[in-house]
Image (cartoon, rainbow, N blue to C red):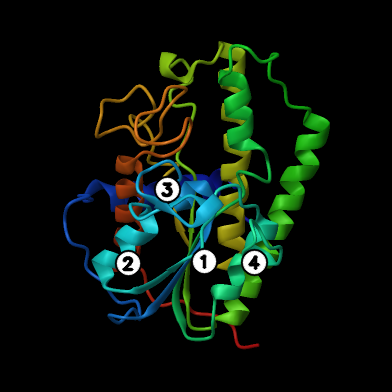
């Protein structure tokens, strides 16, 4: 199996190629994938998929925004969107565990689903919770116990792999797109983060562990990887308005340490670019 480093380098090359011609305002071409107008598109994931914090929000406690990247992708390709993303969701909430009174997200995936997008895993590792703790000047110094993080990373890799395999079985003809998390601590010395240097390094290390899992699982399962993490340079909390994909401690128009509206526009365009150049999925017969 290729090393994690080689997988990440390959992912970076693919994403930068796609992003080099991206324009968040330009219409996307549907390409060669079997996505006809009106096709069923199910969006799954956590707050980084739901656009939590970006008004207007709906979905009760799930805090979904109609400006999240799934809505933008659906609008560009004229798809029927079923957006069940939810703030705070873990892999279990997508796979089989109800959340906030709603069914498990994967229940929305049917045999006729043509496109599935998925951004999840950060809550399994406590990624944004950790960022909030590190940025809170009134809180105790934030720490991560490596002895507990490493088993969580291994469990996330196994659980996410199982989830994707179940999604592929539920919707055999669907294109499954795994979308990574934009980098939060970017750059680590950005004053808008509100982190001390050791705190920034800690948040960055957990983000890198999450990224490694997502890249590895995409390669294992053969899904289409769309990688905002790899394209995040210059788009952190210290970037100018319009170029800032993630906010820091003091957020404008979103929650702290979450993607901005510009971030969701960029994520959507990366998805659209990948769909426009990818061939239909080739899966082994059962």
Q: Secondary structure at mark 3?
A: loop
Q: Residues within 10 Å of mark 4 (few under 14, many from 20)?
A: many
Q: Quadrant of the C terminus?
A: bottom right
| Mark 2 and mark 4 residues within 8 Å of each other at the beta carbon | no
Q: CA distance from mark 1 to mark 2?
A: 19 Å
Q: CA distance from mark 4 to mark 1?
A: 21 Å
The label number, if any, that marks residue 104 in the structure image: 4
Residue 131 place in picture, x, y as percent: 58, 27
Would you say 224 lies left or right of 279 here?
Answer: right
Residue 24 place in picture, x, y as percent: 22, 50
Would you say 258 lies left or right of 74 here?
Answer: right
Closer to viewer: mark 1 or mark 3: 3
Residue 150 place in picture, x, y as percent: 77, 39
Closer to viewer: mark 3 or mark 2: 3
Label 2, on which residue? 74
| Mark 3 and mark 2 residues within 8 Å of each other at the beta carbon | no
In the image, 58 versus 283, the foreground residue is 58
Label 1, on which residue? 223
Q: CA distance from mark 2 to mark 4?
A: 22 Å
Q: CA distance from mark 3 to mark 4?
A: 19 Å
Residue shown at the point (27%, 33%) measured from the top left = 243
């Amino acid at each position: 199996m290729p090393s994690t480093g080689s997988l990440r380098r390959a992912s970076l090359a693919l994403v930068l190629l796609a992003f080099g011609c991206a324009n968040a305002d330009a219409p996307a071409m549907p390409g060669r994938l079997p996505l006809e107008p009106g096709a069923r598109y199910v969006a799954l994931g956590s707050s980084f998929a739901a656009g939590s914090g970006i008004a207007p929000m709906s979905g009760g406690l799930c805090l979904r925004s109609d400006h999240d990247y799934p809505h933008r992708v659906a609008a560009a390709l004229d798809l029927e969107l079923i957006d069940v993303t939810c703030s705070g969701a873990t892999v279990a909430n997508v796979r089989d565990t109800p959340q906030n009174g709603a069914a498990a997200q994967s229940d929305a995936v049917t045999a006729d689903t043509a496109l599935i997008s998925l951004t999840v895993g950060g809550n399994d590792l406590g990624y944004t919770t950790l960022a909030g703790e590190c940025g809170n000047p009134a809180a105790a110094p934030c720490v991560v116990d490596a002895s507990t993080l490493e088993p969580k990373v291994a469990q996330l890799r196994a659980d996410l792999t199982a989830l994707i395999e179940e999604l592929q079985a539920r919707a055999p003809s669907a294109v499954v797109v795994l979308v990574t998390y934009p980098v939060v601590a970017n750059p680590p010395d950005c004053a808008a983060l509100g982190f001390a240097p050791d705190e920034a390094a800690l948040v960055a290390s957990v983000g890198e562990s999450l990224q490694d899992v997502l890249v590895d699982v995409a390669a294992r399962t053969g899904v289409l990887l769309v990688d905002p993490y790899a394209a995040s340079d210059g788009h952190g909390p210290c970037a100018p308005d319009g170029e800032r994909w993630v906010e820091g401690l003091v957020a404008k128009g979103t929650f702290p340490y979450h993607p901005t509206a510009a971030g969701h526009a960029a994520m959507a365009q990366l998805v659209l670019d990948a769909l426009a150049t990818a061939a239909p999925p080739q899966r082994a017969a059962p």
